[in-house]
Image: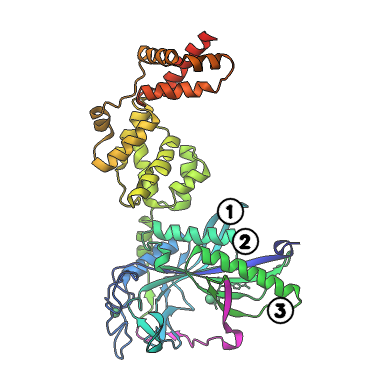
Amino acid sequence: MTTYDEFEPVIGLEVHAEMQTQSKMFCSCPVLDATTAQANTAVCPVCAGMPGVLPVVNQRAVDYAIRVALALGCTIAPTSIFARKNYFYPDLPKGYQISQYEEPLAQHGLLPIITSEGEGVIRVRRVHLEEDTGKLTHVTGEGGSYSLVDLNRAGVPLLEIVSEPDMHTIEAVRAYAEGLRAILRYLGVNSGDMEKGVIRFEANISLRPRGSQTLGTRVEIKNLNSFRALERSVAYQIERQAETLRRGETVALETVGWNEAEGVTFIQRSKEEAHDYRYFPEPDLPPLVVDEAWVEKARALLPELPQAILRRFQQQYQLSAYDAGLLTAERDLAVYFEAVLAAAPGVSPKQAANWVLGDLFALMNSLGRDISSPPLSPDALAGLLQALSAGQINNSTAKTVLTEMAASGKSARQIIDERGLTQISDASFVSDLVQRVLAENAGEVERYRAGKESLGQWFFGQVMRQAQGKANPQVVREELQRQLDTLK
Ligand code: ADP
Ligand code: MG
Ligand code: ZN
């Protein structure tokens, strides 16, 4: 019996996402790229926690948070309260984090997911705003062991999105996490660059016997920075808890970390060591008031969301779920694809999808570019696809032209004309060529007639080569077959 036959995993996720505004949550320091900025270059008395300073709420950060909450179908609270979450840690200069606790910005949302089990929905419990902490770097060097603190990140707006414990498979966890990331990116509030730490996950996991409705004791895995770490650590916890329960023992309420190198979780805090954060309302900030006009304005500006575009692409363009999924993974890509279609009437969506996902992506990879700054415009690609579907060039010529377009910035039409690449469909030209190839290869023709039919493909290659790749393959194939048939 496998773990999954015996137990049902129950998983809830807490996701922290930076709101990538110009300035921090409560001061005017800039929000910098953590991987390139010099340490402690964006710090002021407010985010350094000096006495006597006053925080001011960043309106843009609230606006971003409202967008996310609405995209998740949450109810926005007309009034929410900032609270102090008190604890000591060297990356927290004030000795407390300003967060929202009893009265969060938004509650009761939903995120639809698709897994191999079909369509499902994960409930979102709450969405609240807080500030990020600084970043510690632990160093062991000649001067002994010490830690460096960088406060650039301290005070960066952070959105916490907490799910209900509605996930029961690792696949569902992944789908939820990816779905959330896609929404954040579509809304333009977060780059989704996981390796830069702008999105972090915490997973809460418990097991219960299959069929049971009560919740087991959970273990919380802190600070997961990649989908891979999320999946692996949850899988590890599921197996570990199953072993514990099989031995007749109980799972302890714990907070653990994830050791990526060794593929194991390690204990950080047990129940006895649980923090008492002594939450109380932040006295330096008034209640956050979000009136209906603000909510409606944000709602009106919401773009079409990933799930909706995915469905529309499948229905409107008859694309597979797979293709539609790839094309809608990023908003820029979905927009690009539809711009190609709009500029290329007569080109089938399936063909356009193949070119975008295949050749365009290969080209972008080789050039180190991505869809936010594509090597050629949708109009340019549309021009190429039209020449192709009109039979002016064949598939392999089109690939060459694509590369040249990116290199020269010229249109497909220009390159085809300048280089005389127009595909030859002229029947008599093709007929002469076929005749010549068959005449020059009398031995192969004999063997073909004796039954070696596979030579047909070889003759085809010879004709195409003689035509320097410009002959219409369909016309060549038919003419070749016709002449070979008369020889039989
Ligand atoms: P805390 O803030 O202390 O981590 P919460 O009650 O806010 O606690 O829950 C955090 C997350 O844990 C939520 O995503 C919730 O769905 C999940 N969760 C709560 N209880 C369980 C459980 N028994 N098993 C799995 N997940 C749980
Ligand atoms: Mg938690
Ligand atoms: Zn500051």
Q: What residue is shown with label 2? A: 169
* Screen quadrant of the N terminus: bottom right
Q: Quadrant of residue 85?
A: bottom left
Residue 286: x and y in percent read 36, 80
How many other residues sit within 10 Å of disc 1, few (<14), some (14-19) or many (≥20)?
A: some
Q: Kindly identify the amino acid type of the residue bearing the numbered disc 1.
A: Thr
Residue 54: x and y in percent read 30, 84
Q: Kindly identify the amino acid type of the residue bearing the numbered disc 2.
A: Thr
Image point (58%, 53%), residue name:
115
Q: Are marks 1 and 2 in contact (CB under 8 Å)?
A: yes
The stretch in magenta equals 264-285
Q: Above or below — where is 452 with respect to 487?
A: below
Q: Quadrant of residue 387?
A: top left
Q: What residue is shown with label 3? A: 250
Q: Nearer the viewer, residue 5 or 68?
A: 5
Q: Are marks 1 and 3 in contact (CB under 8 Å)?
A: no
| Residue farthest to the top, as pictured | 486
Q: Earlier in the sequence, mark 1 or mark 2?
A: 1
Q: What residue is shown with label 1? A: 115
Q: Kindly identify the amino acid type of the residue bearing the numbered disc 3.
A: Thr
